[in-house]
Amino acid sequence: MADYGLITSPLITEKGTLVSEKSNQVVFKVRPDATKGAIRDAVEELFKVSVVKVRTINLMGKSRRVGKTAGKRPDWKKAYVTLKEGDRIEIFEGV
């Protein structure tokens, strides 16, 4: 049983769109504690596709200031999911 809470949201950016057209990949924002195997299981179960490979990137949150108060945005993780040839996820179609 996959943990659906691992995948926070799809990332629709210029680079993500280029990668999806070129390499049959989709990009997701995932929880920082998510593993590649768990991400694979969640994507396969949620979207009914076959996953070939998962690559992840840990991104550090930026430091921000508002007046005297300094803060930091949270750290987050990005996952590039390569799908089997012929599989598509409709969220990214027509974007």
Image: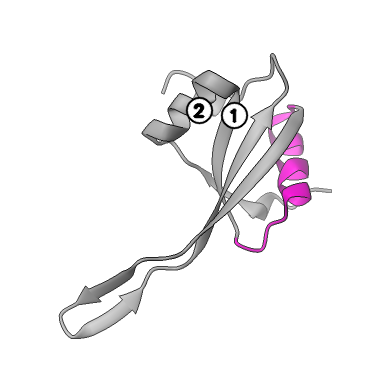
What's the colour scheme?
Answer: one colour
Q: CA distance from mark 1 to mark 2?
A: 6 Å
- Quick one: label 1, few (<14), some, or many (20+) residues within 10 Å? many
Q: Are marks 1 and 2 in contact (CB under 8 Å)?
A: yes
Mark 2 — residue?
A: 19
Q: Is residue 3 above or below residue 49?
A: below
Number of residues whose C-alpha sits closer than 10 Å to that of mark 2, classed few (under 14), some (14–19) or many (20 or more)? some
Q: In the image, residue 46 lies at what x, y percent?
A: 70, 37
**In this image, 1 relative to 86: left or right?**
right
Is residue 70 left or right of 76 when viewed as pictured?
left
* Residue pictured at 23% horizontal, 75% vertical: 65
| Residue 64 picture location, percent across and down | 28, 71
Span highlighted in magenta in the image: 32-49
Q: Which residue is mark 1?
A: 25
Asked if 60 appears above or below 8 in the picture, the reply is: below
Q: Amino acid at mark 2?
A: Val
Residue 34 vs residue 15, the one in the foreground: 15
Quadrant in which the C terminus is drawn: top left
Q: Callout 2: helix, strand or loop?
A: helix
**Image point (69%, 14%), residue name:** 86
Residue 80: which quarter of the image?
top right
Left of 85 or right of it: where is 28? left
* Magenta residues, dominant SS class: helix
